[in-house]
């Protein structure tokens, strides 16, 4: 029966020079560094793609929410027009919206520590 050993154990130490060993080490190190750089680039690209998707959905949500808000304002004006003149209903809803916007801006400036 033949005793089989792995090739790395069975092979005799090579007669390679220190220069060749250093060259191999440098080559392997270079390959590892290049691989890590490629991996980092792929990770950054994936993260960027995820952020772009998030921003896109946030913008679409904001636009659709803004349109929905305008529709609700128009409905409020139409309903209020049954009680008062249309121009007065529009003025009332516009002023109420301006007051809400002002309060929200005031609150946001206090959150950041600045004043308007």
Image (cartoon, rainbow, N blue to C red):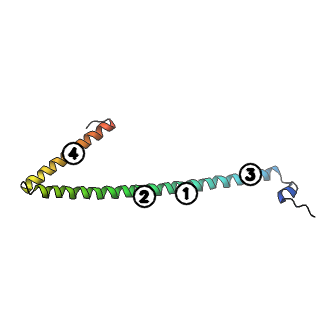
Q: Secondary structure at mark 2?
A: helix
Query: Which sits earlier in the primary sequence, circle 1 or circle 3?
Result: 3
C-beta proximity under 8 Å, tags 2 and 4: no
Q: Quadrant of residue 3?
A: bottom right
Residue located 19% across and 47% down the image: 98
Mark 3–mark 2 distance (CA, rounded to whole Å): 42 Å
Neighbour tally class for label 4: few under 14, some 14-19, many 20 plus, Cα within 10 Å: few
Query: Which sits earlier in the primary sequence, circle 3 or circle 2?
Result: 3
Mark 2–mark 1 distance (CA, rounded to whole Å): 17 Å
Q: Secondary structure at mark 4?
A: helix
Q: Which mark is residue 53?
A: 2
Q: Which mark is residue 25?
A: 3
> Residue 56 at x, y = what percent?
38, 58
Task: Identify the residue under disc 4.
Answer: 100
Q: Secondary structure at mark 1?
A: helix
C-beta proximity under 8 Å, tags 2 and 1: no
41 relative to 83 in the view: left or right: right
């Amino acid at each position: 029966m033949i005793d089989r050993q792995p090739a790395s154990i069975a092979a005799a130490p090579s007669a390679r020079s220190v220069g060749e060993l250093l060259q191999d080490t440098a080559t392997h190190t270079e390959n590892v560094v290049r691989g890590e750089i490629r991996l980092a680039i792929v990770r950054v690209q994936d993260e960027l793609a995820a952020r772009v998707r998030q921003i896109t959905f946030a913008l679409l949500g904001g636009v659709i929410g803004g349109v929905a808000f305008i529709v609700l304002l128009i409905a409020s004006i139409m309903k209020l027009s049954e009680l008062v003149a249309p121009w007065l209903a529009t003025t009332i809803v516009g002023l109420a919206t301006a007051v809400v916007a002002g309060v929200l801006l005031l609150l946001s400036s206090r959150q950041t520590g600045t004043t308007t």
